[in-house]
Image (tube, rainbow, N blue to C red):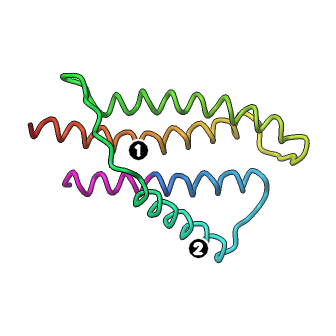
Amino acid sequence: MSQRWFRRLLGVSSVLIAVLWVAGVARFRDYEFSNMEWAVLIAGAFALHTISNRLRRPRPLPQLPEGANPVRLAALAALIVGVLAAIVAGALEWLVEPYRPTNTPWLLRTMWHAACAFAASYCGFLSSLSAAAAAQRRR
């Protein structure tokens, strides 16, 4: 698979993970999406992704240290994002619980937020870092 298609797939993966994240939160709160709501959610996610990509200014690629593995760097950065998401989401879920009770355990909801944040940020970081690694190899 070419680098170009790999980065496109990673970009789409982040959007699909975000849709899955919203679906999981809705499921925790006992809300079922209708077919039309699923279509609107997915279309809205891809529309926001397209708009944000077009409005984003081009920025220089990061400079990776010699011999750095983009997969490991992306995993480390995503781990940091996942831990921060777990802390923030855990606090928010704890605060929301009295107002919107659910049968899903607090720890499971917190881990869901952390896992989705990790996965989405991993795809984003890996896309950026793999592009940087490919640019450095061409030099």
**Residue 73 location, quadrant:** top left
From what the image shows, is residue 44 above or below residue 69?
A: below
Q: Which mark is residue 124?
A: 1
Task: Identify the residue at horizontal 41%, vertical 57% (top origin).
Answer: 53
Q: In the picture, residue 5 is in which quadrant? A: bottom left
Q: List the residue tagged with mark 2.
A: 39
Determine the residue positioned at 46% across, 51% down.
Answer: 14
State how many labels appear: 2
Pointers 1 and 2 in contact (CB under 8 A)?
Answer: no
Q: Residue 118 appears at what percent x and percent y?
A: 51, 37
Secondary structure predominantly adopted by residues drawn in magenta: helix
Q: Residue furthest left?
A: 139
Quarter of the image with the N terminus in it: bottom left
Please name the amino acid that badge 1 sits on.
Answer: Gly
The residues colored magenta run: 1-13
The numbered dot on residue 53 is none
Q: Residue furthest right?
A: 98
Q: Amino acid at mark 2?
A: Ala
The one of 26 and 84 positioned closer to us in this rendering:
84
Which label's residue is closer to the chain start, 1 or 2? 2
Q: Where residue 68 sits: x, y (%)?
A: 24, 25
Q: Is residue 11 magenta?
A: yes
